[in-house]
Amino acid sequence: MIELRNVKKYFKKPVRGKGVLGMLKTLFSRKYTLVKAVDGVSFDINDGEAVGYIGANGAGKSTTIKIMSGILTPTEGDIFIDGQRPYVNRERKNVLKSIGVVFGQKTQLWLDLPLTETYDLLKGVYDIPKDEYTKRLGELIELLDMKPFISAPVRTLSLGQRMRADLAAAMLHNPKTLFLDEPTIGLDVLVKRNLISAIKSIRAQYNTTLLLTTHAMSDIEQLCERVIVLDNGKTLFDGTIDGIKHMFGDKRNITVTTNRPITSDSVQTLSDRCDVPPEISQDGRQVKFSVDAGKQHVNEFLKSVLTTLPVEDIKITETDIEQVVRTIYENGIAPPPESESDGTGGEPDGENDRKEIETDGDGQKDGKIDETD
Amino acid sequence: MKPIRTAKIYSSFTKTNFLLTFAYRGQVFLWLLGGLLTAVMSGLLWWAVFKFGDGATSIAGFTYPQMLLYMIMSAICGEALYCGTADEIARDVRNGVIGMRLTKPISYQGQHVAMAIGNFGGRMIVIGIPMITLGTIVAVFGFGLTGIEWYNVLLAVPALFLGLLLKNAIGFMFGQIAFKTQAMWGVLSMLDVFVSFLSGAIVPLSLFPSGVQTALGYTPFPSVISLPVRIFMGMCTPYEIAIGFATSLFWIVVLNVLGALWYKRSVRHVVVFGG
């Protein structure tokens, strides 16, 4: 089980001046900006659960994963993985043995060696018994289709092959928990589909707890039951995939194509039943309605459309998660009171919470705040 | 059983780095060429010093054949003992690979010791043993060098190994600077020149003023190159060998402890944002 309790991670960055003079001043300046990368995040993840951890660039996702995987120490708060803290020296080893980590933009493989040598090395690192190692490596080679390149030097692998190899490296010691930080970044559609299906199979086979960060919402929909949205270092939403989809209501987007141009007057009666005014295309032959299925019957609305407008074609789509997440990134969360969202979010502070606070270096006496160079 | 298991874990890194030394043919060829060129140029330089000096048969206790073998040995040992620890730490920090290393349930410092041993083993096989053998044959049969004894050759092996551990410990300490600055090229070049000069890789330490020699005796540097080469050439008394080994061991412990403490502070500077 993973438990995060009010985790904060602040960094101090020196304030750099512009131009040659500014850079020279930096050499003697003690001014810093305080960056709140993670600012009071709390959540629990149960064994075997698959959670999508999403947020815009710089929201604090990777920093959280780095704290959970023992790379960084939190400034405040606690993280427990099966009761142990990854950043405490005497507990660290046990945690690291029970987790596997894949960073999409970094590799843990030895570039100049054949893949098998890296796996042999990891066998030693995790002290995996020989029989278990052979069995598991065989399974992973099969599952991730690595036979064609298992003896090739890592440097010669394509990105898709390298990512599969990295996933196998992270799973070799059968970790209870797997952290995947943008594992599908840069992969083509086919490779991505295969990788996702391999991760699904691995989860099904080993009941691995999964925490996935990605910008591809389809990955989250396919792999996770739950999603946590992070923004400016704070949790905005923590709930089910359905919950986030419907957090702004159970919306249906209805696009109606008409056989002759229409005006805004002709959709006036329909417009009153929508949350937002309908959008009419420039040529007047297409109109888009957004209807909350929780407030009215969609079939009734469609009947009205058919009787009011000279309909040629109708297309209905549900609000997809991508759309919702885009709205959250842009505007934060402001759910209508009757929304059935089980989110835990609230209004964002308005200002950027990951704001950079200027300090003169003496202002921050807390030794835990890390300095960047 | 724990020490055996620990040794087994770290031996994987030794094996990996041992294999890495054979990964590229061109690289092996360049090491050989580098060692050979340094040895030949130093040999010629000292030949000119002896020839155009005022007829002296020995300089700072070295005859020309001794000086020739010393320079060959120090050039080859310099290549064999090349320890990329500081460079690797700098690369790990710059490329963000340090994060991946920190997710492994083993010591980063231990990894580097194991990797340095593997690297040393590979380099000794590829260039160390063949070139030292060749240099000795040239010095003994070409220039009439005497005094090479089998027991000194055997004693030089642990001395070289201690030299490697010292170089690794120095490299690990200075590699920590990479956590503070990206300008590691200058730091590493300075470190290389500094260690080479003070360890006797550029000129024998007996050429230094006696006060400096005495002061250097208390530092770890002579144990890196000067001590193993002089042991090999039979230029050390048993007492000097014993003192040399004791000094090496003392500094290996001190530098590794200091390195571990500094590393503990350094990892707090791993503050990479995002991916």
Image (cartoon, rainbow, N blue to C red):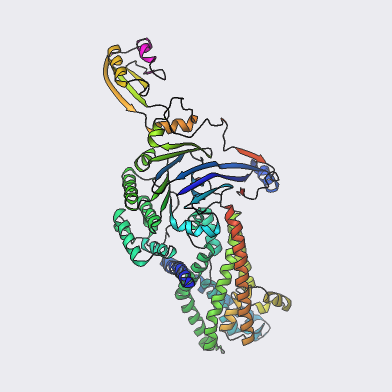
The image shows residue A81 at horizontal and vertical percentages of 48, 52
Q: How many marks?
A: 0
The residue lying toward the viewer, choosing from B105 and B31, is B105
The image shows residue A340 at horizontal and vertical percentages of 41, 29
Q: What residue occupies the far left of the structure in this picture?
A: A312
The image shows residue B43 at horizontal and vertical percentages of 57, 78
The span picked out in magenta is A260-282
Quadrant of residue A261 in the image? top left
Whether residue A271 appears in magenta in the rendering, the answer is yes
Whether residue B167 appears in magenta in the rendering, the answer is no
The image shows residue A335 at horizontal and vertical percentages of 46, 27
Quadrant of residue A277 in the image? top left
Q: Is residue B249 above or below residue A139?
A: below
In the image, is A237 to the left or to the right of B90? left
Q: What residue occupies the far top of the structure in this picture?
A: A265
Q: Is residue A348 above or below residue B109?
A: above
Quadrant of residue B210 in the image? bottom right
| Residue at screen point 50% across, 80% down | B132
| Residue at screen point 30% across, 14% down | A304
| Residue at screen point 62% across, 45% down | A12
Would you say residue B190 is visible in this rendering? yes
The residue lying toward the viewer, choosing from A371 and B203, is A371
The residue lying toward the viewer, choosing from B162 and B197, is B162
Q: Is residue B231 above or below residue A251?
A: below
The residue lying toward the viewer, choosing from A308 and B82, is A308
In the image, is A206 to the left or to the right of B155? left
